[in-house]
Image: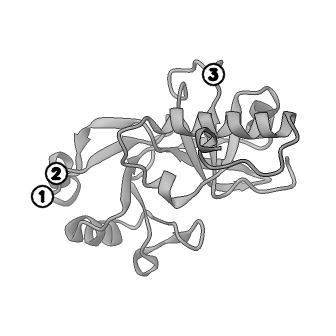
Amino acid sequence: MASSSLKNHFLVAQEELTDSNFGRSVVFIFEHGPEGAAGVVINKPSKLTIEELSDKIYSSKIEWDKPILIGGPVSGPLLVVHQDPDWADDEISQEVFRTVDPDKIRHILESQLEPSVLIANYAGWGPNQLESEIEEGSWAILEALPRFVFWNEVKDLWDVLMAECNVRILSRVLKIRRSPNDPTTN
């Protein structure tokens, strides 16, 4: 595990992980290497929208009723995960980008760029800390597909991804090479 990067992967909290910051959380990893890892929880909305906070951040109101997610327990700047490379500070994958530059974020907010996720704070791990948590069984790992990064469906994202993890485990145990997207249609 230590040799391969988890950048552009999800950490899906296992049911046994009851930490108040990470219970039933889905963490989108955007940095992972020998120095540690960083990512954002993408399924924990705050009660605030950008419209409610914009005048405190930019001294003018931006009318957009988009929720701000709580990305983790580590204080950090507002960041936006989106799909427009022209406004990116960092490429996470060919289809997903991250922006922390305040001027670029302001443009993204004013233009109401979609799909996008607005996130305050982040989650961070020191060297080998995340690898230890994975070995302990705290996290399942899945590739971060854009449709899940920008999830806005009624179904709970954690439930959907846990079901995917369980299908993969069952497929491995039963030695099924390829399983259908929806096993009930088989």
Query: Dot 2: what SS?
Result: helix
Q: Amino acid at mark 1?
A: Glu
Seen at 77% across and 35% down, the residue is: 169
Seen at 64% across and 41% down, the residue is: 183
3 or 2: mark nearer the eye: 3
Contact? badges 3 and 1 (CB < 8 Å)? no
In the rendered image, the quadrant that contains the C terminus is top right
- For the residues labelled 3 and 2, the Cα–Cα distance comes to 33 Å
Seen at 73% across and 39% down, the residue is: 130
Q: Is residue 85 above or below residue 129?
A: below
User: Dot 1: within a 10 Å radius of its alpha carbon, few (fewer than 14), some, or many (20 or more) residues?
Assistant: some
> Which of disc 1 and disc 2 is earlier in sequence?
2
Q: Amino acid at mark 2?
A: Glu
Task: Find residue 122 and report its horizontal and vertical position in percent.
Answer: 50, 44
> Position of 170 compared to 8: left or right?
right
Residue at the front extreme, as displayed: 186
Quadrant position of residue 87 = bottom left
Q: Amino acid at mark 3?
A: Leu
The residue that mark 2 highlights is 51
> Which of disc 2 and disc 3 is earlier in sequence?
3
- For the residues labelled 2 and 1, the Cα–Cα distance comes to 5 Å
User: Dot 2: within a 10 Å radius of its alpha carbon, few (fewer than 14), some, or many (20 or more) residues?
Assistant: some
Q: Which mark is residue 17?
A: 3
Contact? badges 2 and 1 (CB < 8 Å)? yes
Task: Find residue 114 and report its horizontal and vertical position in percent.
Answer: 32, 65
The residue that mark 1 highlights is 63
